Amino acid sequence: EEVLSASKDMAGQRVLITAGGTREAIDPVRYITNRSSGKMGYALAQEALRRGAQVTLVTTPTGLDLPAGVEAVMVESAEEMRQAVLERFERVDVVVKAAAVADYRPLMQQEQKLKKKTDHLLLELVKNPDILAELGQKKNRQVLVGFAAETNDLETYALDKLRRKNLDLMVANDVTQPGAGFGKDTNIVTIFNRQGEKEQLDLMSKAELARRIFDKVIEILSARV
Ligand code: CTP
Ligand code: CA
């Protein structure tokens, strides 16, 4: 069955996927992060490999097993992820940004461990660069896929991000729905394209969702030639 269904329809395609939540250092022993598990990004990498693509996975430490055959690039902060992605962008055909990039990082990274002294401690944060928006500016032929996790006004925010970041596809999930969002093996998403069309998908495994996403990527690639 696998033999019949495993058409290598992404053979020759170079795919870059980002996964996991970035870690923004406070001092040598502490960092700020988010609830991203990396599961969606790893499922995407697995699926692209299965379809014959050459896959680079830029990932934060997640504890997940790397899919066999993937080129892994380990990063921690948003800035490291940005460098790793920008270095490789010119050489890839498809980018899927499943990573949860921290929007802010501590302004100061203390070289020594912060000691407990005062009753109150204010941590000043500064905005991180938006990696996906930068790719959207730079892209020539690359198919760009973004993710959005929203708690409200999903369609408005998802479409705004799709346009603002010059994406080809936006995969949006409402994280308030049980079965969707961080840490789970399943997801419930709506996928938007540049034409403003949307497809609302039912609850499915992240593996199945990865298949649906690359089906759409292939459609976009094949409509171009
Ligand atoms: N993203 C990125 N770099 C950032 C922030 C986000 O590349 N500094 C990418 C994410 O990987 C994701 C997409 O942008 O594919 C949308 O992320 P999201 O957090 O939903 O959107 P933001 O633009 O950060 O807006 P907000 O968090 O305010 O909703
Ligand atoms: Ca964000």
Image: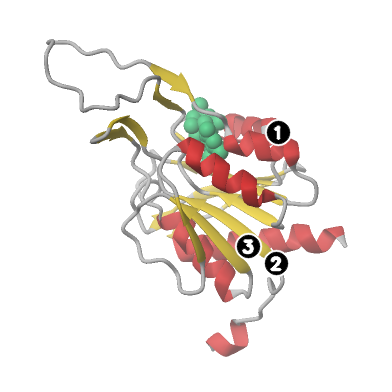
Quick check: marks 2 and 1 in contact, CB under 8 Å? no
User: 75 left or right of 85?
Assistant: left
Colour scheme employed for the rendering of this structure: secondary structure
Where, quadrant-wise, is the C terminus in this rendering? bottom right
Name the residue furthest right. Answer: 225
State left or right for residue 5 relative to residue 116.
right
Query: Which mark lies nearer to you, 2 or 3?
Result: 2
Q: Mark 1 or mark 3: which comes first in sequence?
A: 1
Q: Which quadrant would residue 35 be assigned to in this image?
A: top left
Q: How many marks?
A: 3
Q: Which residue is mark 3?
A: 214
Tell which of 42 and 148 is nearer to you: 42
Report, in whole angstroms, how far the alpha carbon at label 2 lies from the one at label 3: 11 Å
Mark 3 surroundings: few (<14), some (14-19) or many (≥20) residues within 10 A? many
Q: Callout 1: few (<14), some (14-19), or many (20+) C-alpha neighbours within 10 Å?
A: some
Q: CA distance from mark 2 to mark 1?
A: 25 Å
Q: Residue at x 57, y 32 (%)?
A: 130
The answer to whether residue 217 is visible is yes
Percent across and percent down for residue 185 are 37, 59
Question: Eyeballing the image, is 33 above or below 141?
Answer: above
Q: Give the label, 2 or 1, closer to the camera.
A: 2
Q: Is residue 63 above or below residue 189?
A: below
Task: State the residue position of label 1.
Answer: 163
Looking at the image, is mark 2 or mark 3 earlier in the sequence? 2
Position of residue 103 measured from the top left corner of the image (x, y, whole percent):
46, 29
Q: Is residue 153 visible?
A: no
